[in-house]
Amino acid sequence: MYVGVTSDLVLRVSEHRLDLKAGYTVDRDIKLLVWYEPHAEMPSAILREKQIKRWLREWKFALIEKSNPRWRDLFSEIAGEV
């Protein structure tokens, strides 16, 4: 599981899917976007990221499953491929 913040979600997910950024997501083969939360301003997004990063794994799973119980990949939705 990976929690992060970006101003360009399509670009960031694409980079992860293509293993363009070495590190945590490449090491763990993280490719799917199963949840995201848009914010109007970067400071609120960063605050929320820090909050979620402190959560227990079970709480993060519950957050995902509330809106995406099947854990389907949401990339096509944000990339305009629906």
Image (cartoon, grey):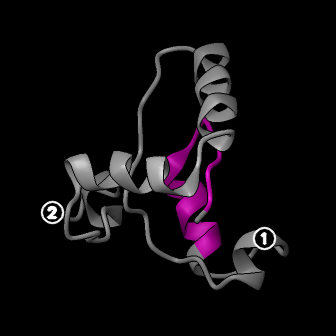
* Three-letter code for the amino acid on which mark 1 is drawn: Tyr
Give how far across and how far down residue 70 sits, in percent.
20, 70
- Compared to residue 7, the image places residue 9 above or below, namely below
- Which of label 1 and label 2 is nearer to you? 1
Give how far across and how far down residue 57 sits, in percent.
55, 56
* For residue 79, side relative to residue 2 (left or right): left
* Three-letter code for the amino acid on which mark 2 is drawn: Val
Specify the segment rendered in magenta.
2-16
Picture residue at 73% right of the left edge, 80% below the top = 26
Q: Nearer the viewer, residue 8 or 65?
A: 65
Q: Residue furthest right?
A: 23
**Quadrant of the snapshot with the N terminus:** bottom right
- The disc, 1 or 2, on the residue closer to the chain's N-terminal end is 1
State how far apart marks 1 and 2 are (Cα): 29 Å
Picture residue at 44% right of the left edge, 72% below the top = 32
Give how far across and how far down residue 82 sits, in percent.
15, 62
Rendered image: mark on residue 82 = 2
SS type, badge 1: helix
Picture residue at 62% right of the left edge, 60% below the top = 2
SS type, badge 2: loop
Give how far across and how far down residue 23 sits, in percent.
84, 72
Task: Characterize the local packing of mark 1: few (<14), some (14-19) or many (20 or more) Cα atoms within 10 angstroms.
Answer: few
Rendered image: mark on residue 24 = 1
Q: Nearer the viewer, residue 70 or 79?
A: 70
- Compared to residue 40, the image places residue 53 above or below, namely below
- Compared to residue 9, the image places residue 69 above or below, namely below
